[in-house]
Image (cartoon, rainbow, N blue to C red):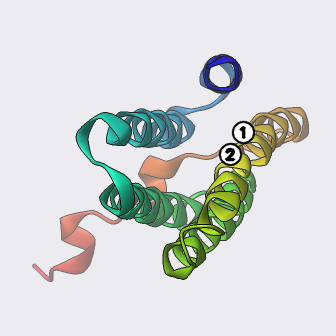
């Protein structure tokens, strides 16, 4: 219980700092991170045993897809680093699915522990980008329908 409380305290603290210094694209990424953390926490109430771990891996894959998409459209560096860290956690989690039940909990814990470096990368990356004056106007980088379809 203490570990879960400490995690949520750290997560909400990192997200609140990031929310203050980030732009709209950063906030979308933070909303995705928060929703994934919340969904992962609720999986224990909805599913049991192996089904819970499979559901968590699906949430991890969705967050990874969102973060890779954001990293591809952002000029900031933290989404790329976060996506890499989260890809590592997701891969470790999938490896745990194929291990015997006696060894899998160690890898599930290892996968979950990658959330802390991810949050650190997010906050430090946003602070460094702000210090260096990196601006990210994601709306200008998104393609409009008129850019794709000829007139």
Query: In this rendering, is residue 3 above or below 116?
Result: above
Quarter occupied by residue 124? top right
Outermost residue toward the left?
151
Name the residue: 72% across, 57% down. Answer: 110
Reply above or below: 118 against 131.
Answer: below
Q: Residue 64, how many percent across, how many down?
A: 50, 63
Spatial separation of the CA atoms under disc 2 and disc 1: 6 Å
Residue 31, relative to residue 36: is it above or below?
above
Front residue of 71/120: it is: 120
Query: What secondary structure is found at the residue carrying circle 2?
Result: helix
Position of residue 16 measured from the top left corner of the image (x, y, whole percent): 63, 17
At 49% across and 74% down in the image, what residue appears? 97
Residue plotted at (74% across, 60% down): 81
Q: Is residue 59 left or right of residue 74?
A: left
- Marker count (numbered): 2
Between 100 and 54, the one nearer to me in the picture: 100
The quadrant of the picture occupied by the N terminus is top right
Q: Write down the quadrant of residue 146 in the picture.
A: bottom left
Label drawn at residue 119:
1
Task: Give the quarter of the image for residue 31.
Answer: top left
Secondary structure category for the residue under label 1: helix
Is 105 in front, or is 150? 105
Q: Is residue 77 left or right of residue 60?
A: right
120 relative position to 9: left or right: right
Q: Residue at 57% of width from left, 32% of height from top?
A: 23
Mark 2 or 1: in front is: 2
**12 or 17, which lies in front?**
12
Do tag 2 and tag 1 residues touch (Cβ < 8 Å)? yes
Quadrant containing the C terminus is bottom left
- x, y percentage for residue 13? 69, 17
Label 2 crowd (10 A; few <14 / some 14-19 / many >=20): some
**What residue did someone put label 2 on?**
115
């Amino acid at each position: 219980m203490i570990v879960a409380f400490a995690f949520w305290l750290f997560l909400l603290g990192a997200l609140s700092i990031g929310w203050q210094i980030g732009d709209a694209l950063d906030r979308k990424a933070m909303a995705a991170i928060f929703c994934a953390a919340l969904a992962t926490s609720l999986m224990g109430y909805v599913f049991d045993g192996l089904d819970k771990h499979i559901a968590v891996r699906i949430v991890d894959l969705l967050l990874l897809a969102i973060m890779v998409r954001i990293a591809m459209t952002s000029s900031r560096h933290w989404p790329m680093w976060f996506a890499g860290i989260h890809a590592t956690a997701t891969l470790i989690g999938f490896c745990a699915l194929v291990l015997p039940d006696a060894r899998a909990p160690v890898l599930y814990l290892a996968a979950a522990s990658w959330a802390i470096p991810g949050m650190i990368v997010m906050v430090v990356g946003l602070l460094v980008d702000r210090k260096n004056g990196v601006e990210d106007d994601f709306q200008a980088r998104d393609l409009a329908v008129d850019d794709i379809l000829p007139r």
